[in-house]
Amino acid sequence: MITSKILFVCTGNICRSPTAEGVMRVLARQAGCTANFLLDSAGTHDYHVGEPPDKRTQQAALRRGYDLSSQRARQVTAEDFVRFDRILAMDLRNLSLLRERCPRDLHGKLTLFLDYAEGHEGNEVPDPYYGGPNGFEHVLDLAEAGARGLLKAFAM
């Protein structure tokens, strides 16, 4: 039975948010609570709609056992604000854009993803798109910390 509907959001939905979604799927499966979650990811912008995650994102994730190949980028819709219980932004810019689009009475659903990662509250997941390979590894580290926190908060 689904108890938590979570949407992960970054800018283009090809690096950070699909990584967070993929990591959360695997960790939930390993914890035996996949059925508790409806998970998805989206972008604040439509730059990459329909595309798979960035190849560098996929390669880094696969090295750690996360297969992101079936995911496709999409843009946040008005329906997402109603459908999801939690909408987790990867950075403050994304959070600000979500607040602009979200009905005021639903703002309580919006927060930073890393607010769930112990020791990282209030921090942002940096965009690795224009950086080197270490950036994708760092995003994975943060996604694992955030997903562990989400599991602790919503499934245990």
Image (cartoon, grey):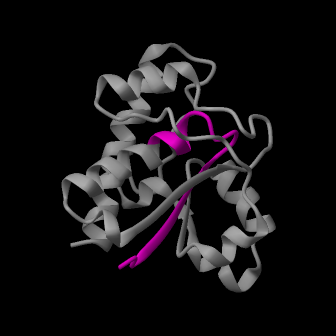
Q: Hey, which residue is sitting farthest top in the picture?
A: 132
Q: How many numbered marks have been drawn onto this rendered protein structure?
A: 0
| Residue at x 36% of width, y 26% of height | 62
Where is residue 1 shown, x and y percent of the image?
Answer: 35, 79
Where is residue 25 shown, x and y percent of the image?
Answer: 36, 52
- Closer to the camera in the image, 125 or 51: 51
- Closer to the camera in the image, 119 or 35: 35
Q: Quadrant of residue 82?
A: bottom right
| Residue at x 50% of width, y 32% of height | 69
Where is residue 130 shown, x and y percent of the image?
Answer: 63, 19
- Closer to the camera in the image, 92 or 139: 139
- In-image side of 41 versus 113 (left or right): right
Where is residue 131 shown, x and y percent of the image?
Answer: 57, 17
Stretch in magenta: 1-19
Image: 152 above or below 94: below
- In-image side of 50 versus 152 (left or right): right
12 falls in the magenta region: yes
Image: 76 above or below 3: above
| Residue at x 54% of width, y 56% of height | 40
Image: 46 above or below 152: above
**Image quadrant in which the C terminus is located:** bottom left
75 falls in the magenta region: no
Q: Hey, which residue is sitting farthest front in the picture?
A: 70
Q: Quadrant of residue 104?
A: bottom right
